[in-house]
Every structure is written in C-alpha cells, then in structure tokens.
Image (cartoon, rainbow, N blue to C red):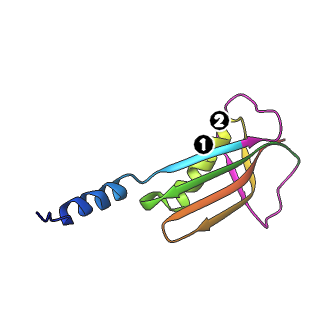
Amino acid sequence: MRRNLFPFAAAVGLAGCLMATVRSEHVLTGAPRAAWAGPVRVVMEGSAAPGAYQEVAIVSATGDGSEATLPAVIGALQREAAALGCNALVRVRYDRGSSSATATGVGVWME
C-alpha cells in the first residue's frame, strides 16, 4: 500500500516556517548589574567606542527563518545586554546566511 507523503512533507515544511525563532546568550566577562530599563546603544565593529566603559559580557543572538533579520537579531542582542545591566553594546558584528543571521558584541556599562 503506497501512501502519498506530499501532505505530510508540506505540513512539516510549513511548521518549520512558523517556528522562526531568535535565541540569545551571553558569557560573563565582568560583573553584571541590575537590569537596565533604558535604551541600549549599539556601536558596530570598526567604529570607535565613545568614552570609557566597563565590560560586562560577550553577548550573541541568532535568528532563524523570518526572524533572520537585522532588527530582530540586534533587538534580541539589546534585550540580552539590558538584562545584564548593560547600557551599550560595542564591537557588534552582524552576519547573515541563507536561512539564519547572527550578531555578536560586547555588553558594557558606559560611564
């Protein structure tokens, strides 16, 4: 008995599209602070970081599917940094592939 696998394959493919996600994580390199409720400034790699700062963590975020966009990934990076008490991200690098995007930066407290 042969079964038509097209409906099953289509359902699996559609579920994959609907499960777009953004994940973020960090590695502490300094002392975290209380969560920051204000805006988190983003300074891209290659730009000079203005003023003195204290390093808190290396932060990264990865988006898949429809969440593999610059705004989604940078937003997740900012939320992760704010949760650690950072008011800025420096040396931020953004990379986009065919189905995912990643941003990595250093979460800091700017004086």
Residue 29 magenta: yes
Mark 1 nearby-residue class (10 Å; few <14, some 14–19, many ≥20): many
Give the residue drawn at x 44%, y 61%.
Answer: 65
Q: Which residue is mark 1?
A: 79
Could you say which is closer to the camera, residue 11 or residue 45?
A: 11
Residue 75: % across, % down? 57, 50
Look at the numbered discs 2 and 1 and tell me whether their residues touch, using CB distance below 8 Å. Answer: yes
Magenta-highlighted residues: 27-51
Is 54 placed left or right of 12 in the picture? right
Judged from this view, the residue extending furthest toward the bottom is: 98
The reply to whether residue 39 is visible in this rendering is: no
Could you say which is closer to the camera, residue 55 or residue 26?
A: 26
Q: Which residue is mark 2?
A: 83
Give the residue drawn at x 64%, y 58%.
Answer: 103
**Dominant secondary-structure state across the stretch colored magenta:** loop
In the picture, the quarter occupied by the C terminus is top right
Give the residue drawn at x 60%, y 60%.
Answer: 102
Judged from this view, the residue extending furthest toward the right is: 52
Give the residue drawn at x 55%, y 70%.
Answer: 97
The type of residue carrying mark 2 is Ala
Could you say which is closer to the camera, residue 50 or residue 106?
A: 106
Q: Looking at the picture, does residue 37 appear above or below residue 105?
A: above
Residue 97 magenta: no
Circle 1 — which element? helix
Q: Looking at the picture, does residue 97 appear above or below residue 56?
A: below
The reply to whether residue 18 is visible in this rendering is: yes
